[in-house]
């Protein structure tokens, strides 16, 4: 009798069975890996999506005044208000001062995204700009009176909705979305990209900003970066305008860093950035999902860095108080008209107090042939 183990099987005998057995387990293992990866991806998506805080209060207040708000931007352009809050509440924020139960907008930037990804223009609004602030709803359901005061009081009076209504009345530009970030969130964003490089002509020693830096080229991480963009008394001429210029310089360098392939194409670097960003911001319902933020980031990534521009609204010391600001006209209205019409503006190095139209520009600020130039910089210039 022949041992069945020696009988030919046509598939290599025991070796064939072992090979089929191994292939079945390999296929099963691959399926488990795929499912695990998909599950992990879904878990990460849900985690990041759940990090975002939605501001429904501002949405409700803005709906109440819909009839007085400007018309939406033309040509599918978008206007996003970026607010840096100086609140002292929450983890990591108390060391910057006493919590008096209020907060003001430490930094406010109107980001205009042109239709078709043609460009992005970030306009800093001085916190000390004297403006007409409308009657706004307080957190305790009472209302403030309409008054003429410095711009950053709007955020203290009525939060984001009051800031948006104040800016819309000033510029006649409709704000489509908003984002609010506090001190701690800003630090985490900078740390997530492994710091941002700057160059200093002189050393800095500012106790109020918790900042001490040597002169020269260096990379700033969270705490130092926050001190750099907040410092005022010990750098330059000590003005808020000088600080806004420094903020624009830093944000340009940050845009360069985030747009680099080392961040966007590296999952191990991209995830911490997304985690920090989603944990750090409070947005309107139109931007409160990871998909919404991804679409926004993708549209920004397609814009060349030389088309990402930073400038300060044309301003000068207020006539009745040199410690406050007022708009320079007609330059400021010219800028607002260009943004409303989604027409290009140019930037040039120099003072921020006036615009400089091109020699062949027309008198109409909304004319396609008029390309006024304002003092500012673009992200391609970097910080060094």
Image: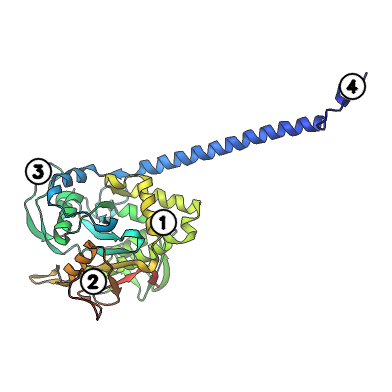
Residue found 38% across the figure and 54% down from its top:
297
Which residue is most to the right? 1
Residue found 17% across the figure and 75% down from its top:
363
Q: Is residue 243 visible?
A: no
Of helix, strand and loop, which one carries label 3? loop
Quadrant of the rendering where the C terminus is positioned: bottom left
Label 3 sits on residue: 142
Of helix, strand and loop, which one carries label 2? loop
The reply to whether discs 2 and 3 touch (Cβ–Cβ < 8 Å) is no
Is tag 4's residue or tag 3's residue first in the polypeptide sequence?
4
Q: Which mark is residue 191?
A: 1
Whether residue 79 is situated above or below residue 234 in the rendered picture: above
Of helix, strand and loop, which one carries label 1? helix
189 lies left or right of 171 = right
The reply to whether discs 1 and 3 touch (Cβ–Cβ < 8 Å) is no
Give whichever of 152, 110 is nearer the camera. Answer: 110
User: CA–CA distance between discs 2 and 3?
Assistant: 37 Å
Of helix, strand and loop, which one carries label 4? loop
Is tag 4's residue or tag 2's residue first in the polypeptide sequence?
4
Label 2 sits on residue: 238
């Amino acid at each position: 009798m022949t041992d069945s183990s020696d009988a030919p099987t046509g598939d290599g005998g025991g070796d064939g069975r072992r090979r089929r057995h191994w292939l079945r387990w390999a296929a099963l293992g691959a399926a488990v890996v795929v499912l695990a990866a998909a599950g992990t991806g879904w878990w990460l998506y849900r985690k990041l999506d759940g990090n975002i805080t939605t501001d429904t209060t501002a949405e409700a207040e803005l709906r109440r005044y819909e009839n007085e708000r400007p018309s939406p931007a033309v040509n599918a352009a978008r206007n996003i208000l970026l607010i840096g809050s100086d609140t002292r509440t929450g983890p990591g924020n108390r060391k910057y001062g006493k919590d008096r139960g209020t907060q003001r907008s430490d930094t406010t930037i109107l980001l205009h995204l042109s239709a078709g990804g043609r460009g992005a223009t970030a306009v800093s609004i001085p916190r000390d700009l004297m403006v007409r602030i409308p009657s706004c709803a307080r957190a305790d359901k009472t209302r403030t009176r309409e008054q003429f005061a410095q711009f950053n009081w709007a955020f203290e009076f009525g939060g984001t909705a009051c800031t948006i209504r104040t800016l819309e009345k000033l510029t006649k530009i409709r704000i489509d979305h908003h984002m609010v970030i506090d001190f701690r969130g800003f630090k985490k964003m900078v740390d997530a990209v492994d710091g941002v490089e700057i160059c200093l002509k002189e050393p800095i020693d500012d106790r109020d900003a918790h900042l001490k830096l040597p002169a020269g080229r260096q990379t700033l991480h969270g705490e130092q970066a926050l001190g750099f963009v907040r410092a005022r008394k010990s750098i330059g001429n000590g003005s808020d305008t000088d600080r806004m210029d420094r903020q624009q310089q830093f944000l340009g360098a940050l845009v360069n860093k985030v747009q680099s392939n080392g961040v966007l194409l590296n999952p191990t670097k991209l995830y911490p950035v997304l985690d920090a960003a989603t944990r750090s911001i409070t947005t309107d319902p139109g931007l409160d999902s990871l998909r919404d933020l991804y679409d926004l980031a993708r549209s920004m990534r397609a814009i060349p860095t030389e088309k990402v521009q930073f400038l300060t609204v044309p301003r000068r010391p207020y006539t009745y108080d040199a410690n406050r600001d007022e708009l320079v006209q007609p330059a400021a209205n010219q800028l607002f008209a260009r943004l409303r019409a989604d027409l290009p503006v140019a930037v040039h190095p120099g003072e921020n107090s006036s615009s400089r139209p091109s020699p062949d520009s027309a008198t109409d600020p909304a004319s396609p042939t008029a390309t006024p130039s304002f003092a500012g910089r673009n992200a391609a210039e970097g910080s060094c």
